[in-house]
Image (tube, grey):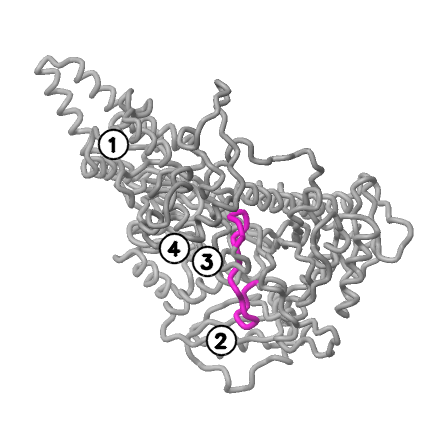
Amino acid sequence: MADPSSYRPKPGQIPDSPGVYRFRDEHRRVIYVGKAKSLRQRLANYFQDLAGLHPRTRTMVTTAASVEWTVVSTEVEALQLEYSWIKEYDPRFNVKYRDDKSYPYLAVTMNEEFPRVQVMRGHKKKGVRYFGPYAHAWAIRDTVDLLLRVFPVRTCSAGVFKNASRTGRPCLLGYIGKCSAPCVGRISPDDHWELADEFCDFMTGRTGTYLRRLEKQMTEAAEEMEYERAARLRDDIGALKKAMEKNAVVLADATDADLIAVAEDELEAAVQIFHVRGGRVRGQRGWVTDKVEEITTGALVEHALQQLYGEETGDAVPKEVLVPALPDPLEPVQEWLTARRGSNVSLRIPQRGDKRALMETVERNAQQSLVLHKTKRASDLTTRSRALEEIAEALDLDSAPLRIECYDISHLQGDDVVASMVVFEDGLARKSEYRRFEIKGRVGDTQVWHGEGQDDVRSMHEVISRRFRRYLADKERTGEWVDGNPDNPGTSENPGTSENPGTSENPGTSENPDATADAPIASSLTEADGRPKRFAYPPQLVVVDGGQPQVAAAKRALDELGIDDIAVCGLAKRLEEVWLPGDDDPVVLPRTSEGLYLLQRVRDEAHRFAITYQRTKRAKRFRAGPLDDVPGLGDARKQALVKHFGSMKRLRSATIDQICEVPGIGRKTAETILAAFASAAPPAPAVNTATGEIMDEEESGTTSDSPGEPVAAGAPEDRRGQET
């Protein structure tokens, strides 16, 4: 626990101007971001007597080890910078709303030549119009099914669209009139785009125009005795009205507004948002947050507004936002919303009438959401705390291991040896911290062993050494590592290794060009920016998948690096016993123990992550062909070659001059390509599984050399070996 006076800025050093400040801990992680109209006055509040601080604020300032600030010219700029830094650094003491679910949206891809209507989740994309969010995906599909009678916009995927274009036959929706079939040219791109635009207009609430137009067309058809057409228009009107009835009118004046309500107690707060467009509720969502800082209702509303509109522009920000309490000060937030919309935005508290009645409904939803969340979480918190305490007691640790790292080795009969590292913090998986390793038989710059064969012990020693060498290197760069080490722990890793995160939560650059889409790569981070670094944070407990040999290897790796403050244990699969370094007998936890259950979950997650990476590498190796051995020939030029010649068979029989006709292929590369084909074994023949007939490559349509294509028949997919 740090003393705030040890890092308190000197008097007069803090400017008396608007700005944003950051508190960092001893590992240089940003743990809190705040903004202030006057940095001098705001920061002085943090350095008063600890007894006078709120308990949460006291915890934050004693956890921090330094404070820094950035001066801006206006409060609006401070608001924007605060939002950017909270999103970038994910500080642990800031209020961060977390969705209780991934809400689906109805999306229209207006950025495509033929716009498509579909259900989308996750981050919003540029050029796509979104409607919602909806509570359930089936609610979107029901609405779309009704509207396609009147607005037959394309709903098929890109693959189905291309296949229909190639065959000249539309899909089922094209035959029954629920798609205008742009894939076969029944409608021009411009007309289809206008049809999608009309669909969007109807979804935004402009319904009267289309209903009146259809009613007029129905009347004219009946007068001209075109009764079939009139009946079809009558059904279309009924479909539109039914779709409108799904969203009841709540505001008679056709208002476009968002209503935000907050329910809170001493520890947590729940936020509910109703999106009203054209007087009808078009979407609803809810967030829950821990109150890790002393905060007012107005500040909770301000954070909700930042998260809700931080990435939105234009009409996505409504003209009117109704809230239970106003942020203080109000003007910067209102100016920020106005700038994001491009026109004036009214931010106010509803006092009477329909809007006040609807706000009460939103508040009831927020209260119910908070009660439901606390009911679900109470048992989870208790169980996780008990599990960590049981682990600490069983392993004789000084405190509960709040950060646990688990390692597992995976291979198939000694081939494609890889390792995984998964992280659990406070008993929950922290997927953005996952890492994966390709075993090379190398520690630092020293080749220790060949890296092949079923040697899990040496693999475990290598992976632990590499992980904690990186940790020590980070400490050395920041000046925390002061005891010289003869083994030079600060040596950087071999650039050929693969140490990549396992989820898309932390995208960035790659340490290894062979990294797969299963684990996008984190950007290279410096020790000064405060964002999560690859190996900067030490765990309190290292768990390895295995028994005594694996545990001894992990402990030996830590001892060689001079690390003695990290506990190590192993969990063996056979009897689920826990092994400690140097002990001849395992620690046996009761089968009903929550601590054992948590260790099993950590071990199983490491195994899953390792085997997923190993299978990906093996599949990539099986898809390899002669073109993969040509230096400098990437996927783009491989695809250009196959597209130019039409098949790998024609490419094999081509001459050097013919290959040189492909854009980007020179004579030297063409000679290398032919040499690669000459030295490669002939491909296995493809077989028609229906007739047993052997097909040539042009008939089969798949080759082992075509980048991104399925493996040709006969490719080795031997699953007989034991996969670990």
Q: Amino acid at mark 1?
A: Pro
Please state if 589 lies on the left or on the right of 313 as rendered: right
| Residue bounds of the magenta highlight | 514-532
Residue beneath disc 2: 69
- Front tag of 4 and 3: 4
Relative to residue 656, is residue 132 depicted above or below? above
Residue 193 in the image, given as x and y percentages of width and height: 22, 39
Residue 602 in the image, given as x and y percentages of width and height: 70, 47
Q: Residues within 10 Å of mark 4 (few under 14, many from 20)?
A: few
The residues tagged by marks 1 and 3 sit, at their Cα atoms, a distance apart of: 44 Å
SS assignment at label 4: loop
Residue beneath disc 3: 303
Q: Is residue 527 magenta?
A: yes
Residue at 74% x, 76% y: name it: 485
- Front tag of 3 and 2: 2
The residues tagged by marks 2 and 1 sit, at their Cα atoms, a distance apart of: 56 Å
Q: Is residue 553 visible?
A: yes
